[in-house]
Amino acid sequence: MRLAASLFAAAALAVVGASNVLDLTPDNFDSTIGKGKPGLVEFFAPWCGHCKNLAPVYEQVADAFASAKDKVVVAKVDADGEGKPLGTKYGVTGYPTLKWFDKDGNATPYEGGRDLDSLVAFISEKAGVKSSIKPPPPPETLILDAHTFDDVALDKEKNVLVSFTAPWCGHCKSMKPAYEQVATTFKPESDCIVANIDADAQLNKEIAARYGVTGYPTIKFFGKGSSEPIAYEGGRNEAEFVEFLNEKCGTHRAVGGGLSDKAGRLPEFDTLASKFFVAVGDARASLLKDAVTLAESAGVVSKHYLRVMEKMVNGTEGYLEKESKRLESILKKRGLAPAKLDEIKIKANILRAFSAPEPETEAVKEERDTAEL
C-alpha cells in the first residue's frame, strides 16, 4: 500500500510539473530549431526578475499551442547557464530576450508585447496555426509605433493622449484595464484619441527618447494645434482620465461610457428654458420667438430646445414627463448604436433644462452684487 501510494504521488507530481515549454540546450537546439518547424524561443536567466514575471505567461502560451506541437515550437534557453553558448551565438545581451526562428532556423527579434494575448497572436500569425485561446475583442486603444506615431500624435487636427508603456511593467499592467475603458468611452469622439506605444520595443526607443521617457508608464497629451505635448500628471484611474480628457477636448463623456448630464446643454438656452417653464400664455410664445432668433447663430443642438418649446406652446399634455420617461427607458436598455445613444442622452439632458430656476445661493448673490458695484 505504501509503495502504491508513493508511486501515485510521484505520478501526480510529474503531471503537475509537466510543461509544454521545451527546454533547449546546445545538445538539442540544432536538432529542434530549423528542422521544418518555426518557433518562439525565450533566452532567460534564472535570477532575472523580468524572466520570473514572464514565466507563468510563457507557460500559458505554450499550453495554447500544445495541440500544435507538430507545427510550432515554444521553447526556452537558460542563456546564463547551460545554454550560454547559444545566448552568445544569437547576440543575447539582456533577459528575457525573445527570438522568432523560421522553419529554416533564421532568427529575428520579437519586439511585441509580452502579455498572453500579444504572444499568442504573434505566433498564430507567424506560424499560421490556431491556438486554443479564444481571441479577445480588439482593444479600442490605438496602438502606435515608430512608423505611425508622428501621423497620429502630431496631427494638428486631433487631441491625442499617449501612454508610453513597457510589456513587463507592473504599473502599466495595472493601468491597462482603466486605460482601455477610457479608449472605448472616447471612441465616438473623432478628434479625441486614446493611444499607446510600447516604448521599450527597439523599434520605438527613438520616439521614447525624443519625449524624455525614462520610466513607465509615462503619459503625455498632444493637444490640437500644439507642437509640444504636456505631461499628464493626474491619477491613473478611469474617472481621472475622463475628467482630464473632457477638459482638454471640450467633451462631456461619462465614466463607464456614454455622455454626462452636461452634454448638449447650452447656458443661454438653459436660461430661456427655465423662464419658459414658469411662464404662461403669451409669455411662452414670446420666449419661443427669442429662442428661434438665438438658434440662428447656435449649433444644431439648439433645435432640441425649440422642439420642446413648440410642443409645450401647442399644449401637448404631459409632454415633458412622458418624453423624459421614454428616453430614460431607452437609455437603460443601451441596445442602440453609440451615436444614437448619444443623441438620445442629449435630448434627455435638454428636457431637464425645462424646470423651475434653482434658488440663488448666497455666493451667487455676493458675486452678482460685486459685479454691479
Image: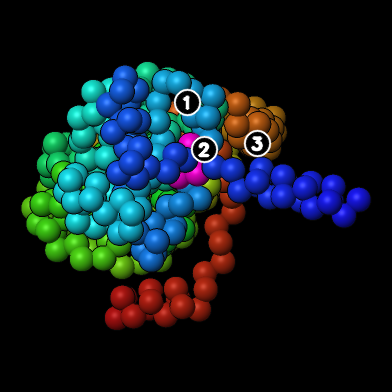
Q: Helix or strand or loop: what does disc 2 sit on?
A: loop
Query: What crowding class fits label 1: few (fewer than 14 Cα within 10 Å), some (14-19), or many (20 or more)?
Result: some
Please state if 5 lies on the left or on the right of 16 as rendered.
Answer: right
Marks 3/1: CA–CA distance? 48 Å
Instruction: Tell me the residue at 20%/66% (across/down).
Output: 214
* Nearer to the camera, 338 or 171: 171
Q: Residue furthest front?
A: 3
Q: Which residue type does callout 3 highlight?
A: Lys
Tell me the magenta residue range.
Answer: 58-62
Residue under pointer 2: 20
**Amino acid found under the numbered disc labelled 2:** Asn
Which one is earlier in the sequence, the residue at label 3 or at label 2? Answer: 2
| Location of residue 206 with respect to 344 vertically, above or below | below
Tell whether position 309 is magenta.
no
Query: What kind of element bears circle 3?
Result: helix
Q: Residue at x 20, y 30 (%)?
A: 106
Q: Main secondary structure of the magenta part?
A: helix
Does the segment drawn in magenta span residue 59? yes
Residue 128, compared with residue 31, is above or below; it is above
